Image (cartoon, grey):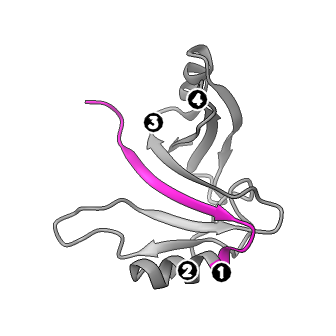
Amino acid sequence: MGQPVVHFEIIGKDPEKLRRYYGDLFGWTFDMRTPVSEAVSEPGNYGCVDHNTTSDGVGIPGGIGGGRDYEAHVIFYVGVPDVEAALQRAESLGGTRRMGPKKNPEGTLAVGHFTDPEGNLIAVAGPM
């Protein structure tokens, strides 16, 4: 079995407005207590989607964040055992590293971003 998609993010210059928009659109509520790397979002300006799965387990976790100095994008994260190794592999196959590995404030999770050969932004996440 391949590696699963484990998280999604919607990043923009006005994350509060984005959270209102997606909250109204899909009924999402947000937990603002989850700290993330400043490479991903301004501190205190990232909200994880609460109740992101149905009772039968359908759905993946996600979050909305960013800030004035962040480029707007939508991205998904693939869970990997080693973020650095995954980024190196992506590069060896024609991708371009864009960020990382960067760790979360607790130092328990690493993330990295790369673009595929067509320029699509993709992310990987795994243990530190």
Quadrant housing residue 46? bottom right
Residue 12 covered by magenta stretch: yes
**Residue reaching furthest top?**
92
Amino acid beneath label 1: Lys
Indicate the secondary structure of the residue bearing disc 1: helix
Identify the mark nearer the N-term, 2 or 3: 2
Q: Which tag, 1 or 4, sits closer to the chain's start?
A: 1
Of the residues shown, which amino acid type is indicated by label 4?
Asp
Q: How busy is the neighbourhood of tag 2: few (under 14 within 10 Å), some, or many (20 plus)?
A: few
Q: Which residue lies under the disc numbered 3? A: 80
The magenta segment is: 1-17
Is residue 32 visible in the rendered image? The answer is: no
* Residue bearing mark 1: 17
Pick whichever of labels 3 and 4 is earlier in the sequence: 3
Separation of marks 3 and 4 at Cα, in angstroms: 17 Å
Pointers 2 and 1 in contact (C-beta within 8 Å): yes
Cα separation between marks 1 and 3: 32 Å
The residue at which mark 4 appears reads as 116
Question: Where does label 2 land, which residue?
Answer: 21
- The amino acid beneath tag 2 is Tyr
Residue at mark 4 to residue at mark 2: CA–CA distance: 29 Å
Q: CA distance from mark 2 to mark 1?
A: 6 Å
